[in-house]
Amino acid sequence: MSTLNNIYNTDFSGKAVCIENLTVNYGGETPAIEGVFLNVEDGDYLGIIGPNGGGKTTLLKAIIGLVSPASGKIEIYGKRPGKTGRLIGYVPQITVLDKSFPITVHEVVLTGRLTSAFTLFHKYTQNDREKADELLDRIGICNLKGRMISELSGGEFQKMLIARALAVKPRLLLLDEPTASVDVSSRDQIFSLLNELNKSMTILLVTHDLSAVSSHVKTLACLNRRLVYHGGAELNEEVVRALYGCPIDLIAHGVPHRVLKEHEESE
Amino acid sequence: MLLSIFQCQFVYNALIASIFASIVCGIIGVIIVEKKLVMMSGGIAHTSYGGVGLGYLLGFEPIIGAFFISVLASLGICYIKRKGGTRSDVVIGLFWSLGMALGILFIALMPGYPPDLSSYLFGSILSVTRTDLYLMAVLTLIVVLVITLLFDYWKSYMFDDEFAAIIGIKTAFIEYLLFILIAMSVVVLIRVVGIILVLALFTAPTAIAGLLAKNLKSRMVYSVIIGSFFCLAGLWISYVFNIASGATIVILSAIGYLAIYIAISIKPHTKRKQSYL
């Protein structure tokens, strides 16, 4: 806990995300995350890493308002989760979506332009279509706009989801494992795109890809049920040990090397 | 011979009923299959049997009872689904059998001779009355209207309801609406294929359309056309051979699906195949 920054800083102004003593349970009493304090500054580029089942996705879903916390407080630009309107752009894990759904790339991006009030016989305007084209162009998959999503590669699918999130015009972009099922060149393209986007929006990224975070993000948070580290983007042995409690391949700045010695898993 | 069939009022009613049933199945079936709500729809359909029994017991039109009970069941099941939790399938199983049990109990409590219930369980399209047709027409119209009025929202909800919720679309409203539409569709289908066979008509035409159609709208349209074909062909076969119409329609749908599935599997270089297998 001593590694936490800003624990007692309750000044919510200028904060993209403010989380105080957050506990979220799985269905029953088992906490997925527990006692998390986290402040994300406006304009930050935060990477959240941690082992599988460490609560990363749960934390994202709590911020978005898809799961409700057992206790604690979350504010996004001063608003409660679920009441954030179009402040948040969300890029879910690819695996949760049905790739056989009959929809084109362009149509998926257009869904990001839907507004909350129901319009009967809703039709996307010319402006909506142009915006979607513009985003696909920016992401670099404009040539695929008429494709069915079933015909996309992992990287193309991921880029499409980013374009859809950007169609919302968010201030805060949340990404869940954006490089999980993506080839290396798409991964690099996605990270350089995120660097570019970070100039105009706050980014919060959940990943198990350690090389990605240490070389791209500005700040780092490590989550294994509890938040065990939050600070600069440099990983060190102590942090990784606290996080995983077991050996791991630590890859820094794109140069793979094993930092920690093999040792028995300890609880 | 064929002309003389059309001159009978009951055959004419049956044809119209088949068309209504195919329309609601085609549209709602696509959503049910895509959102993996087939079993929940089965739960709603079977619970409606309680309403049929209640109608007989209290002396009102059983199909109206089925309508109210299935709407109630759909709201209950939607609530359980939204609450999540690992026990939702258990609760739906209970709904399923409780509805049927209540139906049996109500009919046992009813004075006089018990009515013939097999027409509700297995459908009896040739005994569709004018009142049934009016009710089916209204429900079909509501289903078609609700889906077309909000089509872009349905598409967004079906592809990724979490994302839709985040950008502020009222997905809870959409979901409850969907469940009410499922209940309405069930009521339309009860007279045609019956409570027990409803699931076949929700799934078979939709699954075939899924193998053939490219986009969502055409998937729904194909599904309506395929459903109409099965209903009309099944009706004709049952008329000619004098066998149960609901069962014939269902068997025909299942055979149709298997045949097309096998045909597509044999042709390994079809583009559609990649996304479905």
Image: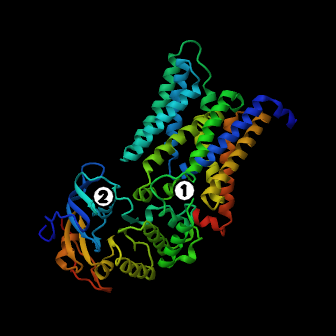
User: Is residue B206 left or right of A23 when viewed as pictured?
Assistant: right
In the depicted structure, whether residue A138 falls above or below residue B129: below
Camera-side residue: A22 or A55? A22
How far from the left and from the top, in percent, is residue B171?
A: 44, 51
Residue at image x 75%, y 29%?
Answer: B10
Residue type at mark 2: give it. Ala
Assign the N terminus of chain A to one quadrant of the image.
Answer: bottom left
Cα–Cα span, label 2 and label 1 = 27 Å
Q: Which residue is mark 1?
A: B152
Would you call the spot at circle 2 few (<14 residues within 10 Å), some (14-19), or many (20 or more)? many
Q: What residue is rendered at 46% in x and 71% in y?
A: A163
- The location of residue A126, given as percent across then percent down, is 57, 67
Q: Chain of mark 1?
A: B
Q: Quadrant of the C terminus of chain A?
A: bottom left
Up-down relation of residue A237 to residue B172 (above or below): below
Can the viewer see residue B49 in this picture? yes
Q: Using the rendered image of the protein, determine whether residue A174 is visible from the camera's viewpoint.
A: no
Q: Position of residue A172 (x, y in %)?
A: 34, 68
Q: Amino acid at mark 1?
A: Asp
Q: Mark 2 and mark 1, same subunit? A: no
Give the residue drawn at x 62%, y 51%.
Answer: B206
Residue at the top extreme?
B112
Q: On the picture, is A218 further left or further right than A195? A: left
Total count of labels: 2
Residue A62, labelled with which disc? 2
Residue B219 versus residue A95: which sits nearer the camera? Answer: B219
Q: Residues within 10 Å of mark 1 (few under 14, many from 20)?
A: many
